[in-house]
Amino acid sequence: MDTILIVDDNQAVCSALSLMLELHGFNTLSCLSPEAALTLLAEQEIALVIQDMNFTQDTTSGEEGKRLFYDIRQHQPKLPIILLTAWTQLELAVELVKEGAADYMGKPWDDDKLLISVNNLISLHALSKQNTQLTRSENQRMSVINDAQLCGIIFASGAMQRCIDLALQIAKSDVSVLITGPNGAGKDKLADIIHANSPLKNKPFIKVNIGALPMELLEAELFGAEAGAFTGANKTRIGRFEAADGGTLFLDEIGNLPLSGQVKLLRVLQTGEFERLGSHQTRKVNVRVISATNADLADDIAAGRFREDLFYRLNVIELALPPLNQRQDDILPLVSHFIGRAFSLSKPTQQALLTYPWPGNVRELENACKRAVILADSPTLTIDDFGFKSQLNHSSSLSGGSPSPQHLSASQTTASSEQKIQEFEPKSGDIKQAEPERADIEKALAQHNGVIARVAKSLGLSRQALYRRMDKFGIEK
């Protein structure tokens, strides 16, 4: 409940204002002098001040109220103040309002008008405080971002901003981190950021793609092997854990680790101990593990493919990276980065890039940009340069020709492009027809007396498609 301070040398005025304000849900404090008011302001949380302008009997200059006003402003510049006096001086009112007085009223006051002013000023003051706090928080966050090593990541979306904020916060600790998200979304970049901003940034950072290693060599890669431990092992080799000792190990596609490797990995995470293949000597390392997966490990646990105890060891903190189609604000900045300053995008191309669902995420986007730069005939890239029409066809065929709910807006936006693709797709029970020529259209118009709906149906076209072809051939209805 907000507290209002009433400052007036007339106790009856203080009592009347207190009663009226308390009936409308406010707490009130009152005092009879400027000195007492300043003391209360230093000790109490005050939302608004209602102050008289004259405190000495037979004084009507308003100088005392003016002095109190400036004293309050010096200590609390944004605190709303309503000036209240029986001796209304317009010039003084104008001066103090310019200096930040919120309102100026004469005695006797209008209760309704005063209540409206009080409610409005307290609401505005609360919003101002909230905005100040948000601004301060944002400035602090941006200061952290500006001082951080972001490893060249490009982003503009709020979703990616939250991921990076969390990654920077996680980086300060040494706990295990599990980064989840689809292939090509940038999980390895987040791992780079975590290591680069951690106390271990000057220590080894070893990356292993579990999915790219043959199962029979996986344990040797992770834990090392003695000479003769298996066919082809002609010399002793250290594993990735030993190489990363004192630093960070990034295990990508951790869901592909076989159960035998999961047992050893669990032991290393618990104790730091392991043995090389072909050796009985126990070795000990101190490694921070960051892992990543595009799999649903909860499903893998239920199916018996992944150990639940290992999951909880890896997933002390989970960092969930959304797919590119859920952070559209990143698309154009990424494209600008990939194509460089020598190229730009036409407006239709920008719209097409924004509405395409990007199932391959950032990796697909980067490849599309490389293609466009190679095939471009001019510095302004078009949809054709990106091979976007074929991409739309491929995306449509993968989804069965209808957009998924998350891509509904994209499909609606590209309706005109899809219509061209679908114009000659037969409806159920129809026979697919060839592209009509000028003579076909003129003949159909004559047969159906120029009724566009009937002409379009006979040619297997939509009305819009028919109109476009009539414009193309210069046929008038």
Image: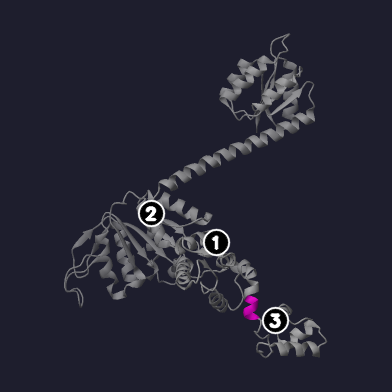
Front label number (2 vs 1) = 1
Q: Earlier in the sequence, mark 2 or mark 1?
A: 2
Which residue corresponds to the image point at 34% horizontal and 61% vertical from the top-left?
A: 250
Q: What residue type is labelled 2?
A: Ile
Q: Mark 1 points at which residue?
A: 328
Which residue is nearer to you in this view: 437 or 34?
437
In depth, the one of 43 and 346 nearer the eye is 346
Q: Earlier in the sequence, mark 2 or mark 3?
A: 2
Of labels 1 and 3, the one closer to you: 3
Judge whether residue 421 is colored magenta: yes
Left or right of 437, for residue 178: left
Residue 129: percent from left, percent from top: 59, 36
Magenta residues: mostly which secondary structure?
helix
Q: In which quarter of the image is residue 41?
A: top right
Q: Residue 44 in the image: state x and y as whole percent.
A: 59, 25
Q: How crowded is mark 1: few (under 14 residues within 10 Å), some or many (20 or more)?
A: many
Of residue 296 and residue 373, the one placed in the foreground of this image is: 373
- Mark 3 residue element: helix
Q: Is disc 2 surrounded by few (<14), some (14 to 19) or many (20+) residues within 10 Å?
A: many
Image: magenta residue range: 418-422
Q: Is mark 1 on a helix, strand or loop?
A: helix
Q: Is residue 372 above or below residue 428?
A: above
| Cα gap from disc 2 to disc 3, whole angstroms | 57 Å
Are the two marked residues, 2 and 1, in contact with CB atoms closer than 8 angstroms? no
**Separation of marks 1 and 3 at Cα, in angstroms:** 35 Å
Q: Mark 2 points at which residue?
A: 194
| Residue carrying label 3 | 469
Name the residue located 52 percent from the left edge and 61 percent from the top edge.
Answer: 332
